[in-house]
Amino acid sequence: MKHMTQDPNPNKKPAEAMSYSSSGVDIDKADSVKAKILSALESTLDSRTMGVGSFGSLFHFAGYKDPVLVSSCDGVGTKLKIAALMDRHTTVGRDIVNHCVNDILCSGAMPLFFMDYIASAHLDQSQIADIVTGLADACLENGIALIGGETAEMPGIYVQGVYDLVGFVVGVVERSDVLDGSRIAEGDVLVGVASSGLHTNGYSLARKVFNIDNDPSQLEKWIPELGRTLGDALLEPHRPYHRLLQPWLQSMHGLAHITGGGFEGNVQRVLPDGVYARIDRSAWDTPVLFKMIKETGNVDAEEMYRVFNMGIGIVAIASKETATDLVDAIPDACIIGTISRQTGAERVILI
């Protein structure tokens, strides 16, 4: 006779059945969010987009003689924390599109299509809808197709209420029109075009300077010198430049997007051997927001120019004649420096 073991706890409830949803990932909600995303991105599509929503998005590439594809990937960074604290998310969608498009513009490329990656602990349908609205609006403004992306729900990796936003862009330029800086020469002139604010760099320092993490109410403070709240100024979207500068690209010798690393870190990336850039910081008026950061945080001037764009979002390098025409055509552009023959180790000097 088989020995039977008696259950020591006959009143014990049966174990609860586990599911993906009980672990924190809701597939049904994810499918609903993706359906709304597809609806938003349809407004950006044109005849070149052959299929969106399958395992891969199809884009018909034609019309170029000797094309070179130019790609870029970047994230919004800790500006996302400002957006989360203010519960305003359309601006960061615009940020990442414009940032990526400006990057490939520096090679002379026009954008073709864009993809995004949004990750969070739990999907917030309203939040995702706002982000994608910003993405789609910026893609329409830039004449670029938003053809897909990934929305990831990752509990245990992300903290509730926090998300990450990354963008990927692909553009094209004829090989003969690639801007690689090789034509930059002694006597060329640097033209700076105004930024719209901090763009997407330096937010960790800005948050610390204004004590935002400890006191988010600072974001609602009205700043008379800015004519708006501090939060509104910090969330101002990254400015796009490709439609503005497109007519001038074939006349330019180089372009530098002023992002993390400031002038020194970005202008030198396009300079050929044998020359250096001399930039005159008195050539433009530093916007109030940057002055506030410097004074409030007692930030050294050199550190400010290393971290922030200081009011210049992109720098074009061209002949004196082209530079003069560019400044005449663009109201918020100005000549900020010159290219000289290199005599030592100098690459970018700010005076």
Image (cartoon, rainbow, N blue to C red):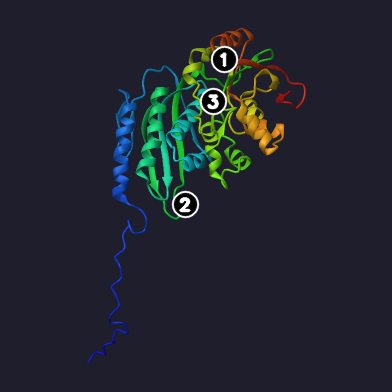
Above or below, 253 relative to 218: above
Q: CA distance from mark 1 to mark 3?
A: 23 Å
1 vs 2, front mark: 2
Camera-side residue of 228 and 118 = 228
Label 1, label 2: how many angstroms apart (C-alpha)? 45 Å
Count of marks overlaid on the render = 3
Q: Tag 3: Cα neighbours inside 10 Å, few (<14), some, or many (≥20)?
A: some
* Kind of residue at disc 3: Ser
The residue that appears at 52% across and 27% down in the rendered structure is 103
Which kind of residue does numbered mark 1 sit on?
Met
Confirm whether residue 276 shows in the render. Answer: no
Q: Earlier in the sequence, mark 1 or mark 3?
A: 3
x and y percent of residue 300 in the render?
A: 72, 35
Q: Secondary structure at mark 1?
A: loop
Residue at numbered disc 2: 159
Marked residue nearer the N-terminal end (1 or 2): 2
Which of 245/239 is in front? 239
Quadrant of the image containing the C terminus:
top right
**Image quadrant occupied by the N terminus:** bottom left
Residue furthest toward the bottom? 1
What's the mark number on residue 252? Answer: 1
Name the residue at the left extreme.
1
Closest to the observer, 342 or 331: 331
**Left or right relative to 211: residue 249:** left
Residue 131 in sight: yes
Neighbour tally class for label 1: few under 14, some 14-19, many 20 plus, Cα within 10 Å: many
Residue occupying image coordinates x 32% and y 46%: 30
| Quarter of the view holding residue 119 | top left
Residue at point 58%, 11% (across, down): 327
Which label is found at residue 196?
Answer: 3
